[in-house]
Image (spheres, grey):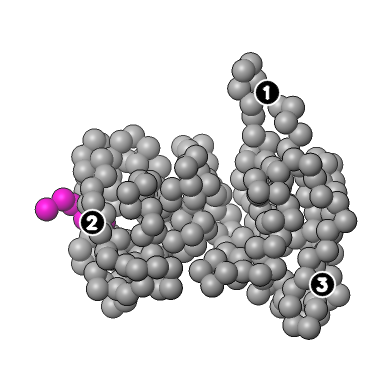
Amino acid sequence: MERLVEIGFQKVGFWRADNGHARCALHIIFDSPHTLYAFVLGDQVQYVGKTSRGLKARMDGYQKPGVSQSTNIRVNRHILDELQRVSTVDIWAISDSDDLQKGCFRINLVDGLEADMIRQLNPPWNKMGVEVPGEVTSSTSANRQEASTVPASPAVTASAQSDGEGPYSAPTFQLQLGVAYFNQGFLNIGVAYERYIGGDRAPVTIQLGPNGPAIDGWINRTANGNNTPRIMGGKMLTDWIQARFKLKGWVQVETLNHHAIRLSPPK
């Protein structure tokens, strides 16, 4: 916690149990909507997140998660589990002061701090552990946790049904492998197909090839300005692409359900 205090974090509220529900009480609400927050037990950081909607609105999401909001549901469960043995889970936060600028360009303090805090602190409630959310660059890829390989599941089929996030029709499209896609372990899903992909930080299964293995990835909807999904697959996705495709080549993407895609050479 000393490191958080040193950079300006302050205790802004806490979570408490109320008839089996997690309730948030905030005694400080920042003026700036851009806020970085942490959930803390004792002096141990359990979770780090950011919001551009304002802290109260973001806490409301954890307090009353929607049925398709997998991150909110997961974190809410962690909070409730801890509140069975402790009276409160503390909320610490820091606001973007809007005063960081390089020439005419503004530096986003919240984005930069979140990524490095997750990398260094490895909070246990952050699903990807040491994996840093956002775009992976060559300087950070060596620090990423490799996605584990799992056998292809019978559930990963083109006939997969909707998982509660809306109608599903399994569209297929192609992406050209530019420098970023070829080297950095992610693929962006454009506006035309984004509704077929799940929510921010939700898990996604990436099947490598028509009959190949599947790896565990995750969905990042904050990396792109229009909130379209970025499929994060890490080093195993990079290795598979580089072994089978050429730079500027094309890969076929089949969206099997909201949390599973299949990649293959174009037909």
Question: Which numbered dot is residue 16?
Answer: 3
**Amino acid on which disc 3 is placed:** Arg
Relative side of 198 to 168, left or right: right
Is-magenta flag for residue 45?
no
Residue 160, image x and y in percent?
29, 73
Query: Does the magenta stretch mainly form a helix, a strand or a loop?
Result: loop
Compare residues 105 and 31 and report the one nearer the observer. Answer: 31
Amino acid tagged 1: Gln
Query: Is residue 2 visible to us here?
Result: no
Span shown in magenta:
263-267
Of callouts 2 and 3, the N-terminal one: 3
Q: Secondary structure at mark 1?
A: strand
Q: Quadrant of residue 125?
A: bottom right
Determine crowd level at label 1: few under 14, some 14-19, many 20+ residues with C-alpha closer than 10 A. Answer: few
What label sits on residue 101 in the rendered view? 1
Identify the residue shown where x is 57% and y is 64%: 71
Name, please, the residue furthest toward the bottom.
19
Of the residues under marks 1 and 3, which one precedes in the sequence? 3
Which residue is tagged 2? 172
Can residue 111 be seen in this snapshot? Answer: yes
Amino acid type at mark 2:
Thr
**Horizontal relation, residue 193 to residue 52: left or right:** left
Q: Secondary structure at mark 3?
A: strand
| Rendered residue at 40%/42% (across/down) | 184
